[in-house]
Image (tube, rainbow, N blue to C red):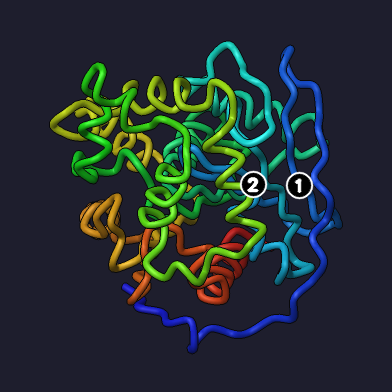
């Protein structure tokens, strides 16, 4: 296990962000940001209720050895709804369709929270096209989750709890980071837009409830994730903030105990969104995995 601090990670100069673009895919419109270049393609997948802006700090310090591609999952950010946008496998299929549309044959899959669960399903769907995985505070590795998410599975109460407004924005910020100062004005504006998206709260609940019940993340979903992990034959790393208030760090630690050949990075003083809170440490772990994957 590696415990990596932000101060210990190499620093990189900030770069301008490439402008987001859109592509029509399967009758839907997908928004994405692409750093371009000949480097190893890396698909960055955000968590539930999020959007590609949550990866801004990776693009600011992008390494030429990597081609970073972040996207808004269907019904998230500024991507349109899709027929299977409350299914992990359906979202995963759209991820591959995006990469195919961009001419990408093989990619390193990186996911935070729900994006980690989606990345696992992508690896299961096309194992020959996944050259490695980085699972950052990944969902569906264990049953435990924060009490508000479990309460949201209850009819009526969930609809009340996700009602759009300033309180919902504040609660999301408090949930995803340990250090609120790591939320830049651009990311905060994206969170506000995502919370206020028409139909966004209903989709959030439908997706959450497909994976979670009052007692926690559904057993059958967790079992499927562990089945996929045992079948993987590529380099992969678990990365988790030690003070994650949404999904406990024990999920990644326990998964790593079953798969000791995988990497494990625990970030002290970090919450649920390590790519925002400790971007240099996150990049260090990403580049190390990319080297293992042959970048």
Task: Point out residue 293 in the picture as x, y percentages from the top left corner.
Answer: 60, 58
Secondary element at tag 1 = strand
Q: Is 82 in front, or is 106?
A: 82
Residue underneath mark 1: 33
Q: Dot 1: few (<14), some (14–19), or many (≥20) neighbours within 10 Å?
A: many
**Left or right: 26 in relation to 55:** right
Count of number-bearing discs: 2
Task: Point out residue 116 in the picture as x, y percentages from the top left corner.
Answer: 45, 44
Give the distance between the C-alpha atoms of the residues marked 1 and 2, in whole angstroms. 7 Å
Q: Is 222 in front, or is 105?
A: 222
Are the residues flagged by discs 1 and 2 in contact, CB closer than 8 Å? Answer: yes
Of the two numbered discs 1 and 2 on the same chain, state the one appearing first in sequence. 1
Q: Residue at x 78, y 59 (%)?
A: 39
Q: Residue at x 24, y 55 (%)?
A: 248
Q: Is residue 259 above or below residue 82?
A: below
- Tell me where residue 229 sits by quadrant: top left
Q: Quadrant of the C terminus?
A: bottom right
**Left or right: 118 in relation to 44:** left
Task: Point out residue 240 in the picture as x, y percentages from the top left corner.
Answer: 36, 62
Residue underneath mark 2: 52
- Identify the disc placed on residue 284: none
Task: Point out residue 170 in the picture as x, y percentages from the top left corner.
Answer: 42, 52
**Left or right: 215 in relation to 196:** left
Q: Is residue 86 above or below residue 108?
A: above
Q: Residue at x 54, y 64 (%)?
A: 183
View extreme (front): residue: 166
Q: Quadrant of the N terminus?
A: bottom left
């Amino acid at each position: 296990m590696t415990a990596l601090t932000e101060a210990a990670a190499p620093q990189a100069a900030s770069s301008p962000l490439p402008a987001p673009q859109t592509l029509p895919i399967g009758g839907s419109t997908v928004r994405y940001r692409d750093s371009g270049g000949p480097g190893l393609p890396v698909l960055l997948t955000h968590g539930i209720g999020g959007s590609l802006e949550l990866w801004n700090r990776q693009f600011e310090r992008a390494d030429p050895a990597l081609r970073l591609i972040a996207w808004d999952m269907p019904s998230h950010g500024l991507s349109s709804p899709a027929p299977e946008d409350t299914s992990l496998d359906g979202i995963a299929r759209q991820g591959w369709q995006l990469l195919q549309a961009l001419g990408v044959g093989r990619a390193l899959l990186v996911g935070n929270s729900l994006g980690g669960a989606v990345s696992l399903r992508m690896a299961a769907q096309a194992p020959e096209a996944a050259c490695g995985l980085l699972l950052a505070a990944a969902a569906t590795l264990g049953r435990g989750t924060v009490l508000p998410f479990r309460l949201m599975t209850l009819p009526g109460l969930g609809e009340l709890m996700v009602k759009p407004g300033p309180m919902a924005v504040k609660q999301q910020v408090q949930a995803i980071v340990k250090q609120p100062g790591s939320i830049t004005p651009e990311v905060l504006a994206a969170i506000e837009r995502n919370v206020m998206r028409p139909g966004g709260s209903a989709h959030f609940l439908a997706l959450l409830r497909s994976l979670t019940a009052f007692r926690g993340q559904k057993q059958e979903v967790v079992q499927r994730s562990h089945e996929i992990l045992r079948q993987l034959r590529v380099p992969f790393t678990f990365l988790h903030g030690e003070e994650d208030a949404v999904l406990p760090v024990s999920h990644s630690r326990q998964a790593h105990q079953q798969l000791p050949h995988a990497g494990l990075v625990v970030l002290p003083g970090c919450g649920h969104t390590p790519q925002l809170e400790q971007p240099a440490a996150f990049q260090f772990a990403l580049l190390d995995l990319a080297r293992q994957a042959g970048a």
